[in-house]
Image (tube, helix red, strand yellow):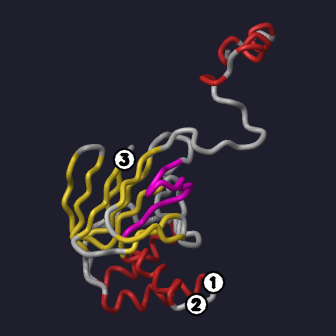
Amino acid sequence: MAEAAGRIVVGSVYAGIDAAANDFANRRRLPRRPIAYQLAALAVTVSWRPVGYTLTVDGETVLMSGHTVVVANAPWYGGGLRVAPGALLDDGLLDLVTVGALPRRKLVPMLAALRRGAHLGLPGIATRQVRQITIAADRPLPVYADGEPLGRGEVTVRVRPAALRLIGAERPQSEVSGPEARRRLRAGDASTA
């Protein structure tokens, strides 16, 4: 899991044209259907200009100009777009995907490739795995997490291992102790004691 602005995030945090489109759709009270977000994306794209980002990635400062920064814990966001096809919920890492300052005419084909998860080799798209990132921009931007507004401005996203407990899931080895550990040892399962 991830944490951003004091909230647990299962899927992704994003700041850029995608968050601006989500914000546009929410402010206009458009019906929550995929077409509403596609129309909002088109409306936002008309006046959108690239953002100057300052990213602090695991302690390293990176400056970039681009359209969005996505920090993903899961492969999908935005109604099924495969933004980070290699992201795993349980690997203890976040997948950072950035879309550089592509010309508008290249944004639509990039979005089509994004739907299929085929954008990761395209010019202007960069990805890497991180444990913590702070996203700052040269202008106030909406920041969204899992489709919900987080606020505007700078945000720090970090890995939060074991932040979510699932009913019926085995407890992590580090939490197995006492009678349960002894039971497992008697059963011959020393690797989980």
Determine the secondary structure under disc 1: loop
Q: Which residue is mark 2?
A: 30
Q: Is residue 7 magenta?
A: yes
**Residue that badge 3 annotates:** 132
Task: Tell which tag, 2 or 1, sits nearer the viewer.
Answer: 2
Q: Picture coordinates of residue 154 (x, y %)? A: 32, 63
Q: Quadrant of residue 178?
A: top right
Q: Residue furthest front?
A: 6
Q: Nearer the viewer, residue 46 or 86?
A: 46
Q: Residues within 10 Å of mark 3 (few under 14, many from 20)?
A: many
Marks 2 and 3 sit apart, C-alpha to C-alpha, by 34 Å
What label sits on residue 33 in the rendered view?
A: 1
In terms of secondary structure, where does tag 3 sit? strand
The crowd level at tag 1 (other Cα within 10 Å; few <14, some 14-19, many 20+) is few
Q: How far across and down, in percent of the image, does residue 129 sit? A: 38, 47
What kind of residue is marked 2? Leu
Separation (CA) of disc 3 from disc 1 = 32 Å
Range drawn in magenta: 1-15
Which of the image's four quarters has the C terminus?
top right
Q: Nearer the viewer, mark 3 or mark 1?
A: 3
Q: Position of residue 116 (x, y in %)?
A: 52, 68
Q: Secondary structure at mark 2?
A: loop
What residue is drawn where x is 80% and y is 11%?
Answer: 187
Are circles 2 and 1 on residues that touch, CB within 8 Å? yes
Dot label at residue 152: none
Q: What residue is rendered at 39% in x and 74% in y?
A: 142
Give the residue type at disc 1: Arg
Earlier in the chain: of badge 2 and badge 3, it is 2
Residue 173, placed above or below residue 145: above
